[in-house]
Amino acid sequence: MDYTTLERTGLKVSVAGLGCGDNSCLGQSAGKSIEYSVGIIRRAMDFGVNFIDTARHYGTEEVIGALL
């Protein structure tokens, strides 16, 4: 995985990020379990993704919370 510096924060973030919204919302829109959705994030992290895009209106807070 390639990484870049996130502007003035100095944080090193992956150039590929994981979006937690859009149509599937990590599978939540399709009725998948929280565990299934957490698995998606874990797999992305296995590949080196450390930039996760989330927002309140995505409705994936419970998934992110379960992962953390």
Image: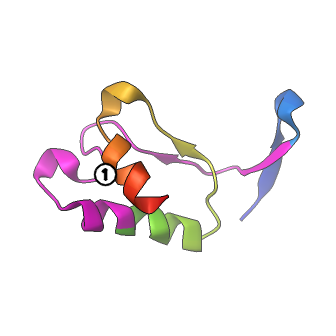
Residue at x-position 76% and y-position 59%: 2
Magenta span of residues? 11-38
Q: Splitting the image into 4 quarters, where does residue 8 fall?
A: top right
Q: Based on the picture, tell me whether residue 27 belongs to the magenta stretch.
A: yes
Q: Quadrant of the N terminus?
A: bottom right
Question: Whole-percent x and y of residue 12?
Answer: 81, 50
> Which of the two residues, 53 or 33, is positioned nearer the viewer here?
33
- Direction from residue 31 to residue 44 in the image, left or right: right
| Image spot of residue 62 (x, y percent) | 32, 47
> What residue did someone put label 1 on?
26
In the figure, is residue 11 to the left or right of 48? right
Mark 1 closeness class: few <14, some 14–19, many ≥20 residues within 10 Å: many
Residue 20 versus residue 41 in the image, above or below: above
Residue at image position (29%, 35%) is 59
Residue at 62% x, 48% y: name it: 51
| Place of residue 65 in the rendered image (x, y in percent of width and height, measured from the top left) | 41, 51
Quarter of the image where one finds residue 58: top left
Please provide percent x and percent y for residue 19.
45, 43
